[in-house]
Amino acid sequence: MADYILVRKSRNIASNMVHILLNLLLGIGAVLITVLSGSPIPGLLLVLVSKWRVFAVRARYLWLNIKSNLVDLIVGVSVVLLAYYAGANFMPVHFILAGFYCIWLLIIKPMSSEGATLAQSLIAVFLGTSAAAIMTAGLDVIALVLLEFLIGYAASRHVLSQSSGRDFTLTTLVCGLVFSEIAWLCNSWSIVYTFGSTGVRVPQVAIILTIFAFVYNYARQAMIKYQEDFRFKHIVGPVVFGAALIGIIVICFSNPIFNI
């Protein structure tokens, strides 16, 4: 019996080591192959191949599986696209993206607490919007609007599916629509903040939507907690702070020097 337990423990350790190694290879390889090839296609294929279990189901479960994994897919695809648009030469941003993707795969993604779920959604909003804004800079605004609808829908669904047993379809669709509206408004002044020669580029709309997503979720939780006794005073702090922060960003940090 003792030998059996020892063998099981050894197998578990070996399995965990292989799991960690594969995730490290994915995190580093997705960025590395994108930069070396000068194309996002190999990196995107690597991300999709890593999610083979999502697609290896019966047709009737396929869409449900895709929806359940949208946040993870958005993060992976965004890392690859941000690495591609940062340039074909290795820059600090590539190492930042590779390191963060490894952390996402090994630490952040497996978490399932309410706070971790919210953090996962906010990360998807920030990275997804950053990639979408940079990728669609030279395209018609409809491309950004559609992508933001998907990001808003995915982020909202990710949070609600973990904390609510009710039908949240309408809520997620409305959230996606609001994301699209904000992205459409922000597209009138496409501002991207750059950080020296690091290659890091952060679109203003990504910051605004991340703040909005946080305040929206706080307000939703407060409404559920207080229900019929809900008052605006329960959310006034985060709402005022979020609105003030967005106002400062738009008014004070929209210098045309950042325009793309």
Image (cartoon, grey):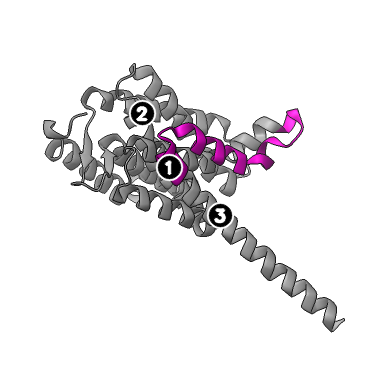
Q: Is residue 227 left or right of residue 50?
A: left
Report x, y in % for residue 215. Answer: 36, 45
Q: Which residues are magenta?
A: 32-61
Question: Residue 6 or 119: which is nearer the viewer?
Answer: 6
- How far apart, in angstroms, are the residues tagged by discs 2 and 3? 26 Å
Judge whether residue 60 is colored magenta: yes
Q: Is residue 33 left or right of residue 232?
A: right
- Dot 3 amino acid type: Asn
Secondary structure type for disc 3: helix
**What residue is at 32 percent from the left and 48 percent from the top?**
93
Within 10 Å of disc 2 (Cα), the crowding (few <14, some 14-19, many 20+) is some
Q: Which residue is denoted by mark 3 in the rendering? A: 23
Q: Is residue 203 left or right of residue 176?
A: left
In the displayed structure, 181 sits above or below 167; it is: above
The answer to whether any part of residue 125 appears in the image is no
Q: Which residue is denoted by mark 1 in the rendering? A: 79
**What residue is at 32 percent from the left and 39 percent from the top?**
86
